[in-house]
Image (cartoon, rainbow, N blue to C red):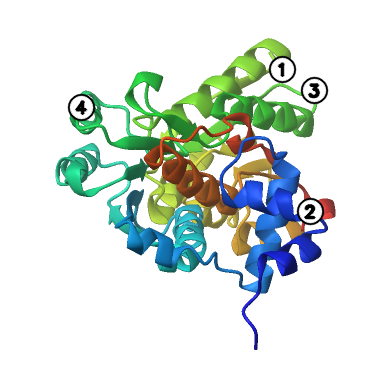
Amino acid sequence: MARPTIHDVAREAGVSLSTVDRVLNGRTSVRAPTRDRVEGAMRSLGYVRNTAAANLSRGRTYRLAFVLPGGANSFMRLLEREVVSYSDPLAPDGVAVEIRTIPPFDEAALRDALLGLDARNLDGLAFVGIDSPAVRDAVRGLRREGLAIVTLVSDLPAELRDHFIGIDNIWAGRTAARLLGRFCGPAPGRIAIVAGSMVVRDHAERRLGFEAVIGTDFPHLTVHPPLEALDDAETAERLLGDLLRADPDIAGIYSLGAGNRGVVAALSRRDTLPPVVMHELTDQSRQWLLDGTIDAVIRQDPEREARAAIRTLLALADGKSFHREENRVGIEIFVPDNLP
């Protein structure tokens, strides 16, 4: 079977050859929906850009490192899978991507992983941030070496990285509050928050946004201090179970991290279910939506995040500009009626 060509990609995507060329060369003049359509056509056709010989002839390779939380977090495993899926076809073009996993929420492990990187042998780094002094110091050292850095999902101060790729987590928390406030109705009540850890900025920002909207627009609802379950299902089940026994009239639950199997397990012992809003659309959360265990899911697209991270790091490695707004990851809300 003949190898797909740029003409095939253009025909599949319904765009001109020049548009495909602009996407391949990282031009910023292509609108995000068009770029997504072209890249989708490349994936469906199995198109691999034939630039390997050119890269090899000039000795140009790209070495990228990803440092991701390990463990059972379904979203992180989806993100890891998408990094592999997007980067594997780029290997003939001299793009090598290494993925390292560390224990979740472990700032010492992240610091050690960053300190163990040799910036002289890397072109770019992407990692999920833990905002602590030790991690900041390790990142500053890599920045002094000139390494291109993007943060994924959870950010650090802007001066420590070139770009952040992820949703606006304050907006996500505010969105969850708007949904849950409506679901709970006008009666006074208390809301439980199940978090991973407040040491990561995404969880802290989601809580901040959530509590701001509840306090302003739903003052009849009060919010319990967050249960920090470290994205572990057993810990989430134990902590939430204890709270439900102590306060059986919980009016709603916001699970802003992972460990959602534990949240559902704790709820399974109740005769009636309070409204529940969770993050990330997985096979499990999809089923919980369909069977009525939970009411809404707020999603960020792991495929888009992986694609944007690799594309941004390659552009930075080549000294090219990239479209910051194009790499913005939006918030998606799913209920049983609009599941993809």
Which label is found at residue 28?
none
Q: Which residue is mark 3?
A: 186
Q: Position of residue 173 (x, y in %)?
A: 60, 28
Q: Is residue 75 visible?
A: yes
Q: Earlier in the sequence, mark 4 or mark 3?
A: 4
Which mark is nearer the camera, 1 or 2? 2
Which residue bears the numbered disc 2? 16
Residue for badge 4: 144
**Left of 41 or right of it: where is 71?**
left
- Counting every numbered tag in the picture gives 4
Instruction: Judge left or right: residue 336 versus residue 279.
Output: right
**Residue beneath label 1, please?**
218
Q: CA distance from mark 4 to mark 3?
A: 54 Å
| CA distance separating discs 1 and 4 | 47 Å
| Relative image position of residue 109 (x, y in whole percent) | 20, 45
Give residue 156's position: percent from left, percent from top. Answer: 37, 26
Which of the two discs, 1 and 3, labels the residue nearer the N terminus?
3
Q: Can you say which quadrant of the picture contains the N terminus?
A: bottom right
